[in-house]
Image: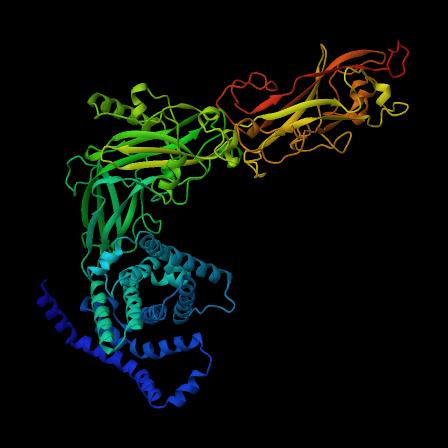
Amino acid sequence: MNKSGDAESEHDEIHNEDFQFALKALLAAYQPILEEDLQRAKAPEDLKKEAEKPASCEDEVALANRIFEKFVTPEVAVRFLPKEGRDLLGPIEQWRWCLLHIRCCIIFGWLVCRGPRTFRSFVYYLHRYWICVRQVLGTPVASPPTAQERQDFKTLTQALADAYKPYLTDQLATVEFSAGIPDEALDGKIDCFEGQEEAAAVFERLLTPQAAQALLGQAAFEAHSKDTFFWFCRCWCLCSIRFGCCLARARNLIDLLRCLLFYFRCLRDCFRPLTCELTAPTGCTEEKAGLVKDGVGVEIDGTALGAFFSHYTLEWRKVQGQACADNSGWSTLGISYPGGGATGVVPVAAGALGWLDTTNLLPDSYEIRLCVFSTIGNVAPCCVCIQFALFKVMVWIDRVADLPGAPVRTPPGWFDHPFPPQEPIVDHNVGGVIVPVGGCISVMGSAWVGDCQNRQIKCVDLRAAIGWQPGTAEAGFAASLPLYSIPMLPTPICYPDPDPLVEAKKRSWWNQLVETNLIRGSWVPTSIPPFDTQYCLPRLCFSSDSILPPCPDTAHGCRSGQYTLLLEVTDTAGHTYYDTQQVWFDNKPIHVEFDGLEGVGPCQDVCLSKFAPKGAPCGVCWPMNLLGIAYDEQIDPLDNSYPSNNFDYYSLSITRQGGPTYVVPITSQLCPPLLGADPLKGIQRVGDPGTRCEQFLGCPAPLHPAKFAGLLSKLDLRIFDAVCAADPSLAAPFAPPPGFALERGHCCAYSFDLFAQDKTWSDAIHPSPLIPGSTGLGLHWISAPPWAVEICNDLSSDAHVPQCP
């Protein structure tokens, strides 16, 4: 409509008899307030006396009630409604609860918009609104509130938080990316009306079905939601909140009239015919993370509202040339709605109608259908369709270190959001504990984009950078990541224009992947034929112990420390996609050294009579200290917490020459030890090797003690005496195995072995000597050279007693 037509329409509305009746009622409600202020202006001394009284939050609530109790009456309300609305409502007795509720809505909007409000102050006025609604419905909030009432208000507050968050997000984005705003202001695109619709959208998002039940209370909601005009009461309330907000910002009586005119039109819009419109997705649509749970999807935008609105539905199918009205092939699988219901139950005006989960959909052309239904059975639904081409984006680092059972694994990157930075690599087998990796590791994942509008993968790059770095789309990337960029691929892999044969093979592989391996929340890598390396990140052995810089700083010496992996993909249209994962690399050696039995010198035999208590009683311990070093360097010398300090355990074993092996219980205070979680493992570092890896790589070594051995464990020497080894105090698991102990009067050679490992994983094959048949656990472990000694059981016996010094 042209401007003259708009002006003519507004002229007709202002001079409408019903509008004039409502205007006079509104002015009459404001008149006493204005007259009182006029009197104050004529009596400044009285004004000063009033101002000396402390301000109270109850004052503005009382003022709101004074204004709107006079204005919100059945007579005024009826004048606002079109004929179909009056017919729908019927006698006042049927809808008095709605009218009383409407007054609370106007007051809520008026109170909230009287000044700048924080979220906390918004919650305060939401509380007043809740109390008002419960009061007019005849179910006032108890003092103190009941448990159910408290839960209802918590539900309301969460609904407000969900409604308020998009507003804050938009404002933050405007502040962060403000480069174009000066031009908009200079060009007149920003004026005094800026932001009003965004603020109004908060109210729209707030009044969800869940919030409505918490607002009214379960019993009142169940009773009134059955009314045929219940949908209109919500629409009426939204118009009323915005009306109250408009009045709060009014600067003069002309503004009051304009607010009333908005209110008049808003209520008539509640009775517009069923409206269905789809605006997105359309064209080449890229799937996004964060829209659906544990997956990727596309947002469906449009309008679904109108008189006697009941609900709306969304469906999808592949484009196959059918008419929109053709009911064949439609699916609702993967569709979700605001509020989480099975259908859309809240009218939507130019907003998000729902979301389609595209995680398991192929790149193809699809069609969305929206249908809006009425509460009146003989009214046909309003249906409309829209088509789009799905652009798949599967760029993520799925796994670092390819180990049996995937003990080192990251969440799929395509489910990650770039804000905040990606989560560290975790071990899902131990409840999400970060696991350092080192040596030669494989990097697995996906690099696949495509393929509408001929947009396909062009180049793939895989890099590592020192420290926790941002991704390519985040602030700080340009100044940080390239500075210390370490190529994991010699050069980015780039491809010529797509070959039709390769494209056909790719499509075949993609179908197989979707059918067999694309599982919700987890992508299972498979063996990819050579021609598919363009589409799936190849399995690479990344030699972290040789490719990483030896010592860029003291926190990353010995090619160890915090690093960020970056997978970056560029498509043929120049768009960039990426995934980052944070990794702790550990290439520092473990130090072990067994220094023997305390008091036993080099080349000396061990005679039990020298160390056993007098009389060699079997009922008490014969303690002997085992000394040595079991030390793993911290990844970061200044960080003693995990995962920097990722020492796992050490263990000791003794093997009789030609005989069995005894695993030594680890104890420093008790002999025999008390049973613990694992008494055969020492979980604390012992001693210090007096050297650090950095000393050999040109880094200044941090201060550390000189080399010294510590107590590895107290050994009970009774295990070597066949007489005392059977004593009940040496019950399993601390008793030696059969054939281990010496008969009195005999000697034999024994070998002491010290083993230690940390919690670092690698793809390098390092079979553990303590785990028979192990082929590639990849743990950082080390064994000290065996320490052999001759032990003689020279305790009194009838047999020959060996000569001991």
Measured along the vertical axis of the image, is residue 769 above or below residue 158? above
Q: Does residue 360 show up?
A: no
Looking at this view, is 433 or 729 the one in front? 433
- The relative height of residue 614 versus residue 263 in the rendered view (above or below) is above
- Residue drawn at 25 percent across, 49 percent down: 301
Q: Quadrant of residue 207?
A: bottom left
Task: Report whether 696 appears left or right of 365.
Answer: right
* Residue 687, x across and y down, in percent: 68, 30
Q: Residue at x 86, y 21 (%)?
A: 610
Judging depth in this view, the residue of 790 and 328 nearest the camera is: 790
Residue 262 spot, x, y in % from top left: 22, 68
The colour style of the image is: rainbow
91, 780: nearer the viewer: 780
Where in the figure is residue 426, as x and y percent of width and height? Answer: 48, 35
Q: Is residue 675 above or below residue 67?
A: above
Q: Is residue 174 left or right of residue 79?
A: right
Query: Does 597 appear above or below 265?
Result: above
